[in-house]
């Protein structure tokens, strides 16, 4: 179990450091800024690379919502859910802390949103709480369906990390303007505490919506698509 938790820690660390780091350090850089398309790719690449690197050890969840969805889908032991969540959140906080140290090393640094998630005034596009809630639920549900399908026995072997990484990229391309994209409570939690905004007060949505979406996605898979398991 220690090796599994270490893999989840490292994988979640990489996701937050690479994905949120691309937003904080590179997205708005004058002349060379990568923009939201680049940030979307960065998040997808973090999952793709770590799924290949440590997925064979822990399953490569890196996300409390994914762990919950896999448990509901019968792919993950319920007894391991709390330890996985703890490792994921801890890895996320370590990544956010190191990212803050790096980002604050330049003159005139202002944390601002610090890649946090939000709705209303904290939404990049000014989207409402209801819009943010629906987006996070639907996109997390879709993410779980992709994960369960790509890792099913009948799926082509060895390609699951590519499908999952591309799915996360697509999710970010859709929802960065709405919520700055969560679909991952651990990713949302750590950076919220470094933001100079009210992100912590809105953090509840970025736990409730991804977890609900993961449950829905897993149930859809079990009820409609589980014939792929055999």
Image: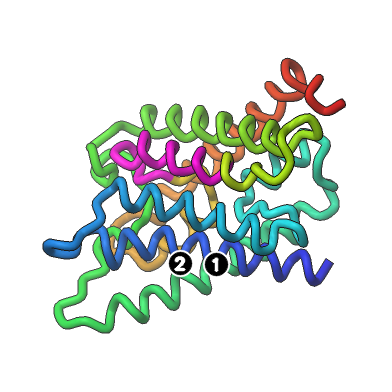
Question: Percent x, y for residue 120?
Answer: 28, 39
Q: Is residue 59 above or below residue 68?
A: below
Q: Residue furthest top?
A: 224
The magenta segment: 164-181
- Which residue lies at the image location 15% right of the left edge and 78% below the top edge? 108
Q: Secondary structure at mark 1?
A: helix
- Residues 159 and 2: in front is 159
Q: Is residue 223 above or below residue 87?
A: above
Q: Residues within 10 Å of mark 1 (few under 14, many from 20)?
A: many
Q: Are marks 2 and 1 in contact (CB under 8 Å)?
A: yes
Q: Which residue is mark 2?
A: 17
Quarter occupied by residue 111: bottom left
Q: Is residue 84 magenta?
A: no
- Which residue lies at the image location 81% right of the left edge and 20% below the top edge? 227
- Residues 197 and 178: in front is 178
Q: Is residue 176 magenta?
A: yes
- Which residue lies at the image location 78% right of the left edge and 24% below the top edge? 228
Q: Is residue 14 above or below residue 182?
A: below
In the displayed structure image, the side of residue 61 where residue 226 appears, left or right: right
In the displayed structure image, the side of residue 202 where residue 48 appears, left or right: right
In the displayed structure image, the side of residue 209 where residue 104 appears, left or right: left
Q: From the image, give the main secondary structure of the stretch colored magenta.
A: helix
How far apart are labels 2 and 1 at the CA level?
6 Å
Q: Secondary structure at mark 2?
A: helix
**In which quadrant of the rendered image does the C terminus lie?**
top right
Mark identifier at residue 13? 1
- Which residue lies at the image location 13% right of the left edge and 64% below the top edge? 30
């Amino acid at each position: 179990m220690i090796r599994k938790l270490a893999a989840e820690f490292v994988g979640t660390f990489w996701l937050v450091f690479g994905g949120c780091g691309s937003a904080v350090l590179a997205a708005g850089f004058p002349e060379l800024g990568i923009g939201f398309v680049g940030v979307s790719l960065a998040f997808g690449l973090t999952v793709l690379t770590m799924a290949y690197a440590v997925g064979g050890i822990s399953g490569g969840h890196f996300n409390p919502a994914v762990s919950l969805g896999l448990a509901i889908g019968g792919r993950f032991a319920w007894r391991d859910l709390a330890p996985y969540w703890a490792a994921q959140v801890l890895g996320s906080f370590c990544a956010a802390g190191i990212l803050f140290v790096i980002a604050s090393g330049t003159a005139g640094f202002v944390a601002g949103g610090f890649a946090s998630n939000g709705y209303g005034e904290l939404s990049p596009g000014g989207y409402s709480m209801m819009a943010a809630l629906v987006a996070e639920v639907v996109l997390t549900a879709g993410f779980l369906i992709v994960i369960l399908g790509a890792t099913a026995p009948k799926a082509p072997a060895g390609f699951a990390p590519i499908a999952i990484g591309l799915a996360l990229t697509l999710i970010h391309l859709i929802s960065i303007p709405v919520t700055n994209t969560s679909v991952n409570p651990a990713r949302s939690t750590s950076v919220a505490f470094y933001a100079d905004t009210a992100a912590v007060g809105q953090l509840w949505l970025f736990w409730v919506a991804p977890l609900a979406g993961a449950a829905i996605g897993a149930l859809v898979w079990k009820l409609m698509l589980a014939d792929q398991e055999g």
